[in-house]
Image (cartoon, coloured by chain):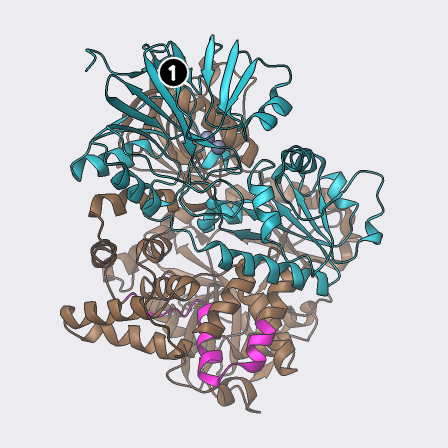
Chain colours: A cyan, B brown
Amino acid sequence: MSSYPALTFTDHGIYCAAGDFYIDPWRPVERALITHGHADHARSGHQSYLATNAALPVMRHRLGEITAQGVPYGDVVTIGDAQVSFHPAGHVPGSAQIRVEVAGEIWVASGDYKTEDDGLSEPFEPQRCHHFITESTFGLPVFRWQPQAQIAREINDWWAACAAAGKTAFLGAYALGKAQRLLTMLNADIGPILTHGAVEATNKVLRAQGIDLPETVHATAEIDPKAYPGALVLAPPSALGSAWARKFGAQENAFASGWMQLRGVRRRRAGDRGFVISDHADWQGLLDTIRETGAENIYVTHGYTDIFTRYLVENGWNAQVVPTEFEGETLDTEGKE
Amino acid sequence: MKHFAALFNAIDHSTKTTVKVSALADYFAEAPDMDRMWTMALFSGRRPKRAVTTTKLREWAAEEARIPLWLFEESYPIVGDLAETIALVLPPNETSSDESLSHWINALRALASVEEEDRKAAVLQAWAQLGGTERFVFNKLITGGFRMGVSQKLMTRALSRATDKSEAELAHRLMGNWHPDDTTWEALIEAEDASADASRPYPFYLAYALEDGPDALGAPEDWRAEWKWDGIRGQLILRDGQHFVWSRGEELMTDRFPELARAVDFLPSGTVLDGELLVWHPQTESPASFNALQRRIGRKTVPKKLLAEAPVVLHAYDLLEWEGADMRETPFAERRAVLERACADLPAEAPVRLSPQLDFDSWEDLAEVRSVARDENAEGLMLKRADSPYLVGRKKGDWWKWKLDPLTIDAVMIYAQAGHGRRANLFTDFTFAVWNGNDLVPFTKAYSGLTDAEFREITKWVRKNTLQRFGPVRQVTPHHVFEIAFEGIQASPRHKSGVALRFPRMSRWRQDKPLQEANTLDDLNDMLRIYG
Ligand SMILES: [Zn+2]
Ligand SMILES: [Zn+2]
């Protein structure tokens, strides 16, 4: 066993001295291992990037020219004195938990994760470890997700009702991951599926890497909305109600996010409907995962850290809050996941 | 309850009035009578009383959810609603129930009279049978906090659509003392003779605020002006030798103002007056300020001494019923003439006085009258069109209130606290201070008046400028000056500053004003001397 922990928490992010690399660092570093392509995890300015093969295309699309290397899930890479491997996190396509082993001590930095198989992302695989770094975005007992099939029914019923009323259905969702997951849930028999540019750009990247997505029409400024009666438009939340959206005439707005579980948040949004669907684990998902890792030491980031940590400590874990640079995905930044 | 939960969702999921009204109209057209009655009751503030303490509900919910109580308590402010927090932490319902809304309301009303053990068993059983919105609605009902984003006015509109009766008629039928226990759909809504109840008041007609002065109202001779009193709006009903006093909020206040009982000695049965309840100073022959009336508010029984010190008189300004006939269609000027005759010979001991009409020939004249309203303990003027009928609810056009500008003072924000529910993640409740030498003396709290964007901005600032935390309250660096507007001021030994304000709110964020230029305690005391 080494005399110092394999991973430490620094002002640049999670650091591995044995391999001299960082995981999801928030300041420029030489070597960055990235769990997934979301903006709060994959930042620009690092000298080299290492991620799963499946995560790289989106990262290149977002970050432009980067020096990056891809690895398959499960392969063990030796970096200095550290053995590193990437394992499915189930969060979005290509997302990974990063397992780091140094002299027999095993750490897992899970990034963002969800436990339900969404049929699109590589399904979550819990990893046995001694030290587990977990998010806690929805780390309160009030968050409990319904099965995806049920949410799919709710969304399709809503869409069909909009179509029957001669209205365009606008569904707001995060452009990477959530939007594509929703695509696979939609019943294309109801009507055509249109996409905002930000969503379509990500679709294009994912299709190019062989991910099968339903047919979509890019809703550019030029298209004639009247040519698509009964359409559903997938767009980032910020685009709902914009001049671009208003072109479509009579419309209903909905928003898909785990935060829609809270009536107060839902009512604050302009969106008329809220569908409770998240790419993060719910309360039970977090607890089940922590149990399955067998880890005794839990490091809590990203979310309701204080509350979740206190609960873990009361239930016998050696848990602590890991400070992060950013306030994270609290109620203030709903929509970001 | 499924049908009602679907209605709740339809209303909750839409921001559009038309959608809400038609969902409610559909419900009224289809639901069984008892459910319609309870729905009308719920939408008109006739909620069942809270049947279980919230402390118990929290304990039981945490226990059922297998979480420690502290975790429940931490979750509650984040969710922002107790009924919702309970509904969310509980495990999913095992079975479902086809029982109606009235079944569940009766079930929870029955809880008040059973032992706690049985009460708990009944609540747990309900939780196990109700899921999603049904469970949330049940919790709202059991905590006595059921509210929905539909006003009584919109509910009446939906009811009108479902019954083909006019909104005005239904509004009148729904006034007064009715309760689902004592009447039926048939008697309340359908029956020909709806005026069987002697206590039934008329719906109040409410004025809009006149923002830009009266010039746009047309010829001054078409209008009548009165003081806008700063009291309690009330309706005095004299029928069958009895008297009833109703508040604007449809609360029966008869027992709170026993001095009005004598009205039956001076005015004939079959009379209904609309007016303002004010404390009367017999010495000066004038109404006292609102501060005097405050001692009477909230008192269910009135001690003799208070009755002598702060006697209340109704200042009548409209006549809704005369000799048993509904006068509301008669033009205002004619109603007023009859009212003046009825009040002409009232002796000093009568608890009713005519609220005077103010003379003016031009709008400039009237503006001058308005400028001295505070001397009369009035808060401005009422303008009423001479030929207007007495309408139902708040309607634009015939009645206007032309209020005095509020009093204002520039103050320094020193404490901040997060809001609730919709605003749980924003700092919206602030404490303000004025200078006393080099010290800042807190004198009021305010939590409204800013836009959401301004609240977001100040929230960011509060996070960065917290000096100290006291539970949910943060002491912040004195830096920001706000203009606080308020309607009145009175001496208050309970407050450090010695004053208490009426309706304080933030009227402007004075980002242009340096900290040192905020007002002082002396300024506040000057205002107290003049307006208190
Ligand atoms: Zn993410
Ligand atoms: Zn994240």
Horizontal side, residue B281 vs residue B206: left or right: left
> Residue furthest toward the front?
A75
Give the residue type at disc 1. Thr
- Quadrant of the image for the N terminus of chain A? top left
Q: Is residue B405 visible?
A: yes
> Residue furthest toward the bottom?
B192
Q: A84 or B396: which is nearer to us?
A: A84
Q: Is residue A292 positioned above or below B7 on the image? A: above
Q: Is residue B360 positioned above or below A102 on the image? A: below
Location of residue B344 (image quadrant):
bottom right
Q: A73 or B443: which is nearer to us?
A: A73
Q: Does B147 lie within the magenta span?
A: no
Q: Position of residue B100 (x, y in %)?
A: 41, 79
Horizontal side, residue B77 vs residue B369: left or right: left
Q: Image point 56% across, 38% down: which residue?
A: A177
Name the residue tied to disc 1.
A78
Q: Position of residue B526 (x, y in %)?
A: 42, 27
Location of residue B368 (image quadrant):
top right
Q: Position of residue B383 (x, y in %)?
A: 66, 55
Q: Does B30 lie within the magenta span?
A: yes
Q: Image point 62% across, 75% down: which residue?
A: B168
Q: Position of residue A44 (x, y in %)?
A: 55, 16
Q: Is residue B497 visible?
A: no
How many marks are shown on the rendered structure? 1
Q: Chain of mark 1?
A: A
Q: Which residues are magenta?
A: B24-50
